[in-house]
Image (spheres, rainbow, N blue to C red):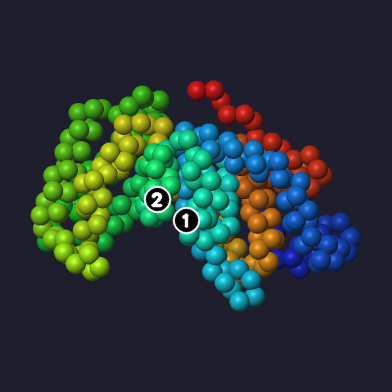
Amino acid sequence: MVVHAIPVARCVELVGSLTGAAPSAGWVHSLIERTAAMLATVDARIRTLITLAYAVCCDETPIRVGARKAKRYLPVACTQRYTWYHLGDRSLATFKDFGLGELSGVVVHDRYQNYDAAVFAGLVHQPCCAHILRDLADAAECYPQANWPAQIADALRDLIHAANTARDAGLPSIDPDFRDTRLTWICSGTAIGLAEVDRNPDPKGKQPPGRCLLEMLHDRLDDVVRFAFDLGVPPTSNQAERDLRPAKTQQKISGRLTPETVIRARYRIRGYVSTAAKHGLDQLAALRDAILGNPWKPPDRAPA
C-alpha cells in the first residue's frame, strides 16, 4: 500500500492469492499504523541524521486529504542517504515543526519565501539551479530579443556540468579559471538584464517578468553558485523532487488520503523504506523486519 500505492482491496486479494488466508480489509489497513508505531525510534533517528548532514535538499508538494479533499502539503528533507517527510501546509509554523531551523548544513531549496524567514537566519542556502534555469527560460520567452537570459543560463549549465564532472572524477574542485569566466558571464548578464528590465516603483505592484530573478542573482550570487566552490553541495533539489514523486503517483491512483493520522503513518513508513533503499536494502525485507518489531536502523553518520 505504501511503497507501490496498491489499494487496500487489492492487497487483500494479493494476500489471499499468496497465502490462502482471508484477512479483512480493516485488518490489512490497520497494519499501516501498527507498522508506523514500530518505526517511531527509527523515524527520529533519520530526522536527526538529516539535521547533521552536510547538505540537505528540501521541497514540498500539495496533496489532497480527507473526505472534502482539503489541500495540505507534504514537505520532505532528504539526502542521497536519508528521507524524512512531514505533513502540514506552507505556513511558517509548519516549517518550524518541519525542523528547518535545526539543519546544520547547506539547504538546497526552490526559493520559497519561508526558507528566508528571519527565524531561520542561520541557514546556509543553495537555491535550486533547476528552478533558476526554468525561470531564465521563461524570461527568454518574455524578452525574445534579449541576450541575457541565454547568457546566464549557459554559464550556469556550464558550472553545473563542470561541478558534476569534477565530483564524479574525485577532484577537489572545478578549474578556477573556467569558474571565474562563467561567473563573469553571469554578472555581466545580470547587469544588462537589470538595465533592460526596469523595476516597478509601486511597492504593491507586480514586478515585470524576470525582474525579481535578476535582483536575486545580483543580491545572492554567492548562494546561487555555492555548488561551484563546494562540490559537497548539489546544484539542484532534484533529490527532493524524486523523493516526493511517489506521493503524486499515489494521489493519481486513489485521489486522496484520509485521515491525517494514517497519512502521517504512511509517510513515516515511506521515509523508512526510502532510506533503507538508499542504503542498498530490499524494501520488502525492511518492511518485514519493521512489521515483526525489529526494524532496520540506519548507521551512524560517517566521520568527516
| 249 with respect to 295 (left or right) | left
Find residue 5 and report its horizontal and vertical position in percent.
65, 61
Q: Closer to the camera, 49 or 19?
A: 49
Q: Closer to the camera, 98 or 287?
A: 98
User: Is the residue marked by circle 1 packed among few (<14), some (14-19), or many (20+) residues within 10 Å?
Assistant: some
Q: Residue at 43% of width from left, 47% of height from top?
A: 119
Find residue 229 and report its horizontal and vertical position in percent.
31, 31
Q: Is residue 221 above or below residue 216?
A: above
Q: Closer to the camera, 108 or 290?
A: 108
Which residue is the site of mark 1? Answer: 92
Q: Residue at 17% of width from left, 35% of height from top?
A: 181
Q: Secondary structure at mark 1?
A: helix
Find residue 56 and report its horizontal and vertical position in percent.
47, 41
Q: Residue at 45% of width from left, 35% of height from top?
A: 105
Q: Is residue 113 above or below residue 299?
A: below
Amino acid type, mark 1: Leu
* First-in-chain label (1 vs 2): 1
Query: Looking at the image, do the residues carrying marks 1 and 2 touch, with CB atoms under 8 Å apart?
Result: yes
User: Is the residue marked by circle 2 packed among few (<14), some (14-19), or many (20+) residues within 10 Å?
Assistant: few
Q: Secondary structure at mark 2?
A: loop
On residue 288, the disc is none
Find residue 230 and report its horizontal and vertical position in percent.
35, 31
Amino acid type, mark 2: Ala
Query: How far apart, in angstroms, are the residues tagged by discs 1 and 2?
Result: 8 Å
Residue 7 in view here: yes
Q: Residue at 17% of width from left, 64% of height from top?
A: 200
Q: Residue at the far front: name it.
A: 119
On residue 117, the disc is 2
Quarter occupied by the N terminus: bottom right
Occupied quadrant, residue 138:
bottom left
Residue 80 in view here: no
